[in-house]
Image (cartoon, coloured by chain):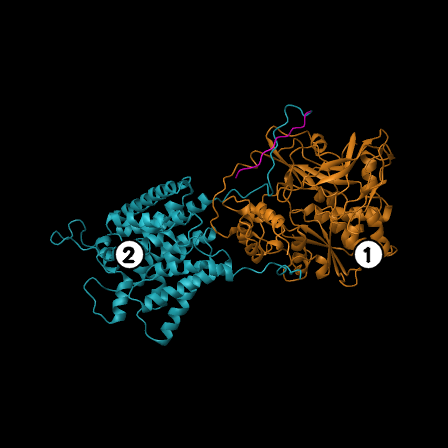
Chain colours: A cyan, B orange
Amino acid sequence: MTEPTTQSDSPQAAPAVPEIHVAPSPHVHDTSRTTRSMMIDVLIALLPVVGVAVYVFGLCVVRQIALCVGGCLVAELLFTILRGRRPTLGDGSAAVTGVILALSLPGPAPWYVGVIASFVAMGIGKVFFGGLGQNIFNPAMVGRAFVMLAFAGMVGASGYVLRPPASSAPATAPAGDVRADVMTQATPMSVAKKLARGETLGANEKMPSRMDLLLGTVNGSLGETSALACLIGGLYLCLRRTASWQIPAGVLLAVVVIAGIAELVSQPQLDVVDHLLGGAILFGAFFIATDLVTSPITPKGKFLFGLGIGALVMLLRTLSNYPEGVMFAVLVMNALVPLINRWTIPKPVGGPMPSKT
Amino acid sequence: MTGTTTRGMAAGTFARGVHPPDRKDLAADAPIEVLPTPKRVTIPLVQHLGAPARSLVKTKQAVAMGEKIAEPGGFISAAVHASVSGTVGRPTKVTLPNARHVAAVPIAVADEQPLAGETLREDIFGGDWPTDVGAYDPKRIAEAVGEAGIVGLGGAAFPTHVKLMPNDAKPVDTLLINGCECEPYLTADDRLMIEHPEPIVTGALLVGRAQGVERIVVVIEDNKPRAIEALRAVAGPAGVEVAAVATKYPQGGEKQAVLAVTGRAVPTGGLPLDVGVVVVNVGTAAAIARAVVRGQPLTHRVISVTGAGVAAPKNLLAPIGVGYGELIDACGGLTADAVRVIAGGPMMGFALGELDVPVTKGTSGVVVLTADDVPRRTETPCLRCGRCVDACPLNLVPSKIAQAARDGDWDLARRYHILACMECGCCAYTCPASLPLVQWIRMGKAQMPRQ
């Protein structure tokens, strides 16, 4: 903040009189929270998720995070300089986008997928809109959407399944190794999709147990698999008020209600608990939808936004060809944020100002 | 804290708001001291909301302490009195902390003063104060208050007699005596309540009589247990309630105090009167008691001089018109690391560019902050995080209003209710991006075309 500075100029003042500055009120501030500290909060909240991911998927997680964070930092620096602005890497937002992007990708994806996604995320997703605070769409999801369409085979459902090299089968992954087990399995959501279509399942396609879904010992995007880790990190974010609880509450409520109704009227492949624990619902609700910049600003708006995401995810999971729909749901609802903000302007205490006519 | 029962659904506090460190410890234990009579005072003719007062004195005229030196310039205006005995100097102009450039009457102080030191304090706050006010004619109370030039001492400086006029269109059933003092650092009201609860209660009873209210409540934040205890002892027997409310900024804001105690929301753009409530600050109540019971005008007030930038924080009983610099000198002067001198509290007060400025009836304190208190902060872009929304006691969307105001988008600013904002500063206090939200909103209100 540039403060207008004047100096006390009373001529008879003793030389020891300190220099007095003026500035507008308020003169005291809550310095405990800054943009940077909130971003660091998100990184802290992601630790359990990253931890489980490394346990389940191994070093490819570290590789993917390094690629995406590095890619996002370089891309933001480059694009900011191209726009002739001061680099803003220090605020931590590019790093957060990088980690979330990495955790939304499949482990086996080749290196250039993460890097290209990072560049699209920071360029088209963020800096071209005017940088931090100006973008409409969640940058990480913009990057992911691009590579999902451009590299469908590597980021689509089949991209999640690690195919062992033809002959030299599990030389590096001994039997019983959780990684080999998990990464050669189809993701729970694509298994469910196949079952719903009435297709026969392959050898590596089976529905995992509830416990696997909870702990995360299933295949999927790196960050989404462990419901427990997402919950721990998400609750931390909400308690710190870095994320607004209204958003995950809205998402989860919509999922529960719609999945519950589906259960009552038919015998769906996935029940309410499967829908909550499987796929990216929890990761999306707590870490993606809660992106400060691309979600509404009022409490009511945040709740509506969450409801919309939950409903769209259920719509996509049930009716579309994609096994999962968190990414598209978030992007669609991002586009509606300006409208939601407009619809949810809160009524001032004491009512609106009476017009003097 | 055993709170006196309060009625209404929102009893005890209001929604949202912030909890800045209160720093009351700096001056809360310093008993009120009488400032030694200064050499000169400069008394502004605009110390209130409304029309300027009209001077009644000529250069070189001798005036006595308490003599009226300016009369009200309209219905919403206030008389001004000499706070010392002395000789009137040439009319001058002063720039008040709120940047208003106003006419002022300088007075060179005579060697002999009718009252000084402890006798002055005794005359203002001491002695017996009646708790049976049935003999006072309601109309006469408002007149006496007008004669005494009393304005709201809580900071807004609204002429008090206007509030006391019997009003058939809008009957008043509740009187709130505001002792919240929610601004951090300030302790003037706290000390007054601890040391002189009697004139406060008498003033409350007089206002209650003038307006014919059913209920009188002294509202105090629960971080002032000594003040609550002192007032309960005096107020209870007199039939005046004492309500301990949650310590939260801006609890002392008129609308927030009314909501906390009565559960009634003052309409935007309206007054507590619209919901049958009158709010009077504790210092104002004491001044009312003195005006009505003793026929004495408002010439002095208690001012907190506090903050880490003052050598020895104190609560001073000072004459209106004394310079801020003299108050600070009386407290040992500024420390070496003092960087900001604030007229009023740190949330809504004005920073002074120079110290040779007179205090007015509305000056509740002087807070001096050090370099550590006001670290240099860097503005970063708005994250749309909504923390300002969570802090706004009026349920506004400060960041949207501020950005609309900054961009001159008056339509948008109105849609987000810019005129409802009272500039309390909760949003800017809490903003993680260090945005000067209140400054933008204030600028917007000033620049916005009137409709």
What residue sits right under mark 1 in the picture?
Answer: B210
Amino acid identity at mark 1: Ala
Residue A203 highlighted magenta (yes or no): no
Residue placed furthest toward the top: A15
Where residue B432 appears, as percent x and y from the top left, is: 50, 45
**Which residue is found at the position 56% from the left and 45% from the top?**
B429
Q: Are marks 1 and 2 in contact (CB under 8 Å)?
A: no
Categorize mark 2 by other alpha carbons within 10 Å: few (<14), some (14-19), many (20+). many
Q: Secondary structure at mark 2?
A: helix
Where residue B76 appears, as percent x and y from the top left, is: 77, 51
What residue sits right under mark 2 in the picture?
Answer: A148
> Against B326, is B175 above or below?
below
Distance (Cα) linking label 1 and label 2: 75 Å
> Against B302, is A143 above or below?
below
The mark tally for this picture is 2
Q: Nearer the viewer, residue B26 or B150?
A: B150
Chain identity of mark 2: A
Q: Is residue B188 left or right of residue A220?
A: right
Name the image quarter holding residue B411: bottom right
Residue placed furthest toward the bottom: A265
